[in-house]
Amino acid sequence: MTAAAPPPARRRSLWQRVRRDRVLLLAALPGVVLLLVFQYLPWLGNVIAFKDYQPFLGINGSPWVGLRNFRVIFDGDPAFVNALKNTLEITLLQVLVVFPVPIALALLLDSLVSERLKRTVQSILYLPHFLSWVIVVAVFQQMLGDAGLLNTFLRTHDLATVHVVGNASVFKELLTAQVLWKDAGWSMILFVAALSRIEPGLYEAAAVDGAGPWRRIWHVSLPGLRGIIVLLLILRLGESLTVGFEQIVLQQGGVGIDSSEVLDTYVFNNGIQQGDWGTSAAVGLVKGLVGLLLVLGANKAAHRLGEQGIYQR
Amino acid sequence: MTHRPTGAAPLGRRAFLRTAAAAGIGVSGAGGLLSACTSSDSGSADNAVRNTAVKLPAYVPWRGVAPDYPGTAQGLLNGFARYPANPARTIAAPPAHGGSISAFVETGSPIPPGMKSNPYWQVLNQRVGAKLDLTIVPAADLSTKFATLMAGGDLPDFMVPPLPPLAGVRGLPQFLAAKCQDLTPFLSGDAVKEYPYLANITTDAWRACVFDGGIYGLPVSRGVAGSLMFYRADLFEQFGVNPAPTSYAEFRTLCKDVTDAKKSRWALVTPGSAMAFVAQMLGVPNGWKAEGGKLTNAFEDERYKQTLSEVRQMVKAGVIHPDGFDPAAPWKQWFNAGNGLMGEDRYTAWPQYYADNVVGPSFRVGGMRPPVFDGGGFAGTWQSPPVNNFTPLKKASTSRIKELLAVANWLAAPFGTEEYLFRKFGVLGVDYTMDNNNPTPTQAGLTQTVLGVRYIVDAPDTIFVPGDPEATKACWDYQKSIIPTSVKDPTVALFSETYSRTGAVLAQHVADAANDILTGRKSLSSWDSAVAQWRSAGGDRIRAEFERQLH
């Protein structure tokens, strides 16, 4: 048996693989087309970041201006720097305060025994997510505004009033409170789902080994959530330059630009409202690139730490 | 009648920007070609000369009905106690010849139902003789939507561009020259007589449509009475307070007298209302002051700073609604509900307050004239620009433009005609009921008729509070009393590219600085640096662009 035929190639050609998976590929096609048309194609429009774009001239008719539109970033236009500073402060506050809350809520909810109670609490917590920002802002105004429910009560009882809505010095805290109220319950759902997948035997084993409730959370629940926590944290980092545009635009007037301008509102107020599309696109482009780098960087760090991250190598 | 809100808007962002008067920024109209796209080239003297050379449409007033309270050439509007009996249909055939006509319009009302579920719209199509394809945009979104409209490239037949104090169109004159129809051959001089209802529009209003040496749009004209301090006459009477202060000191006392925070009742709805009123008492310029070819902005005037200082005291004294700083504050509702007893608003809101009244028949509003600050007569009030907006037409063939102008002529049919009655109130028995020649809208009428076509072009404004001749008379009397001494903004009908583009953002920064002072976040002395910043960020360029066009 000397001239044994070489074993048939395990690897099929591209064409063979396409033929084999044709049904699946066909099923994926509409999604891919949508993605191309609505996500990738518009990216080409980013070319206006390098042009003095005027809508009535069109993209082709507008003159090239090199990096002029990026000047606000590189020259550090004070308004831009202020917007960046506010954005980062709000992001930091949200990562530190908002991010852990759904995890805590999920753990609390998980510790409830009655299924009915669990479901009711869960519904109450996530329903505010379905209210639009206009309504959430109005509700906060009605409750905490200077002529709102709380202050009217205080005033009629000759007590000192509290200045929350429209107060620049607590604006970021107010934003955070609104985000918490609106979205903490919604974000909790993912964690609740992850918790329900943890093998109950692990808890029993831990209990048998003498672990109290805290130790069970620390050694069983949290490790069970680690994957999803890392995943969501990485995604959050990618959005760290994006903070509640609608929420802020609605409330900006009362507190002033100094404390409320973030990158998105900066682009809106200075770029879109003034028809300065080039600068808007430039800031948006840089924002996107920074977000991408942060996601990739965080993902790499996650791999180093032995986590899966958002995708595997 | 609804219009872009002005007046009592709080001192904050978008609302503030619309408060031309309160902000002390003039709303400018037109004029001046811009060479290239750099703002420093805008509004050159050459083009001011070219624009002045344009022969405006002849003014041939329509005299079909006699007003109960006649207006004047100075800008006092005609007042009508009731709608003229048996209004005649003055245009027999539908002006359009089928097909469809598209328009991009603004509205200050809730967006009406679409064409299919809107019987009024369907009848309107029949009357016009074409399918009216309307894009109706809330006034607050006009700037953004118009920018995307231009980017889309598919322009409608009629379009309402945002004008300052909204963020304007970048390179408006170039846009008009590149994409819109020069109407000069159709409307200049006696040519307009082919469209008698367009000839019924005042010359001042047409002046706001001149750009790049041509007539580039149709005006939606307004009276110049401007904003005024509305007060709840019924409540003032109930509290026994005299609504005619003779000095600032008396005004402050009056504010304290009517305020009762425990009952959720404040004298003024917003700080913006107080600012505008006190500034007029002190004689702050209406946007700009022209002297020997030089312009000074209201912000640079020492008296504006004094206004800030006085209003800061009023905020401290708690006579202004505490949520009034919120730009989205529903101050009109506060006024109607009696939570705020005074508010600065445009004169056009007079009938609106009666229409929105939730109190019942006892409801009364009045106009408070600003006294001279230290006493001794009344102070001059600020005039508003003679147009609400102007509407360019997309470039088209001569026959198409003539058809569209015929439609515009129909849309401008004046008060007293059957066309006007149909346009504003709809179909008798469906959209409104007629009682003693007073049209009263039904619920269907209120929601369906607000299509915004009144912003394509409109007849000259009139004073008419349906069903309330007494209120009509009060409004007319007020206008009659203030117009002779009212102050014009010298930059009206001039165009500044920098102002058009950045005026909104500049005003925002100034409003923020003012709010910082009014709320006590910063001291009064911070105002000087805010003004310096305003100057360097564009204020000086705006000044230079306007000054080049001053004659």
Image (cartoon, coloured by chain):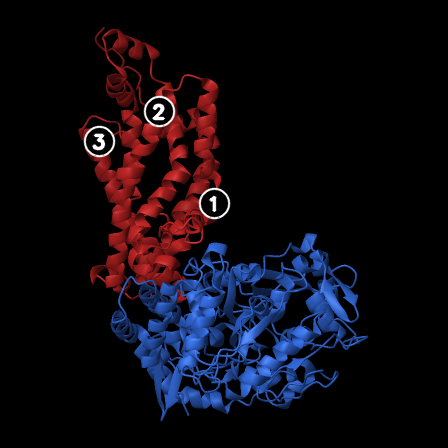
Chain colours: A red, B blue
Quadrant (top left/top right/bottom left/bottom right) for the N terminus of chain B? bottom right
Q: Secondary structure at mark 2?
A: helix
The amino acid marked with disc number 3 is Ala
Mark closer to the observer (2, 1): 2
Q: For mark 3, does the 10 Å Cα neighbourhood hold few (<14), some (14 to 19), or many (20 or more) residues?
A: some
Question: Label 1 sits on what residue type?
Answer: Ser
Callout 3: SS: helix
Seen in the image, is B108 located left or right of residue A194? right
Task: Indicate left or right for B134 with A39 as reference.
Answer: right
How much space separates mark 2 and mark 1, taking CA atoms?
27 Å
Q: Is residue B461 above or below residue A186?
A: below
According to the image, label 1 marks what residue?
A: A132
On the image, the x and y values in percent for residue B368 come to 53, 76
Q: Residue B551: horizontal and vertical position, in percent?
A: 42, 92
Mark closer to the observer (3, 1): 1
Q: Which residue position is annotated with label 3?
A: A302
Q: Establish if B255 lies above or below A160.
A: below
Circle 2: residue type: Leu
Q: Classify residue B9 as left or right of residue B294.
A: right
Instruction: Measure the alpha-carbon separation of dots 3 and 2.
Output: 27 Å
How many other residues sit within 10 Å of disc 1, few (<14), some (14-19) or many (≥20)?
Answer: few
Q: Residue at x 52, y 70 (%)?
A: B345
Q: Nearer the viewer, residue B192 or B36?
A: B192
Subunit under mark 3: A
**First reached walking from the N terminus: tag 3 or tag 1:** 1
